[in-house]
Image (cartoon, rainbow, N blue to C red):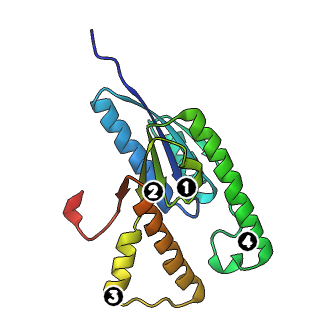
Amino acid sequence: MGKTARKNKIVIVCAGLGMGNASRVAAVIESLSSRAIHNDDAIAFHVFSWGQGFQFLKAFRSKCRVEFDLTELHAYPSAHSVDSIASPLAVWKYVSTFFKNVRALRKRVQRIQPNVIILDSDYHFPAYFSSRAEKVFIGQAFDVLERVKEHSFRADSWGESLNLFVRENLDSILQKNFCSLVLVPSFSDPGAL
């Protein structure tokens, strides 16, 4: 009698600012699915995103051979521009959207009880605190901060400076203290893949 396939549950959450994060997530889904088939395992993917990331993943799901659940999170107002979130009303909308998403993700994670949570530029960390799942972060914060130092980079605008130094440092801190594994897409070692 053949061996019974194991059912792993993986939650994947990615930022919806553009299609870069979502395209990495699509590649991760395809790769993990292929490995699972090769190892006679089964994976149930539960993917969450918003904005352009959600739209990309929705189109990807309709054309790929891998089945996965896809849930749209609340979209962030003015998320594409750091400069536009300076008003008190915009800050309030951003913060309230963040807590709505944290609440929704916490409920789903508790219901799904995943083995692994994969985060691609996702900041909804409070949603995952109670989960015993291994947390994996796909991010370039360490790489970006090293390149900034190495090349003496200077931001051209206040918005770029805020994004670079606050967001990348926040990414770095969260990755170091919260995740058990950080995957860094990098061009520094082309032979690594």
Image quarter (top left, top right, bottom left or bottom right) of the C terminus: bottom left
Residue 168, position in %: x, y?
47, 73
Task: Check whether the beta carbons of the residues at disc 2 and disc 1 lie within 8 A of each other.
Answer: yes
Q: Is residue 148 above or below residue 74?
A: below
Name the residue rendered at 56%, 81% in the picture: 162
Q: Earlier in the sequence, mark 3 or mark 2?
A: 3
Q: Position of residue 24 (x, y in %)?
A: 43, 55
Do callouts 4 and 1 mark residues in contact (Cβ within 8 Å)?
Answer: no
Which of the pair 20/15 is nearer the observer? 15
- Where is mark 1, residue-wise? 125
Q: Which residue is mark 2?
A: 178
- Amino acid residing under circle 1: Phe
- The residue indicated by pointer 4 is 91
Label 4 vs 2, first from the N-terminus:
4
At label 3, which amino acid type do we have?
His
Labels 3 and 4 touching (C-beta < 8 A) = no
* Residue holding disc 3: 151
Nearest to the eye among marks 4 and 1: give it.
Answer: 1
- Asked whether the beta carbons under mark 4 and mark 2 sit within 8 Å of each other, the answer is no
> SS class of the residue under badge 2?
helix
- Residue 160, compared with residue 61, is above or below; it is below
* Residue 7 horizontal/vertical position (percent): 42, 27
Q: Residues within 10 Å of mark 2 (few under 14, many from 20)?
A: some
Can I make out residue 172 in this image?
A: yes
- Labels 3, 4: front one: 4
- x and y percent of residue 48 in the render? 57, 47
For mark 1, give the secondary structure.
Answer: helix
What amino acid type should be assigned to the residue bearing mark 2? Phe
Residue in the picture at 50% in, 55% down = 22
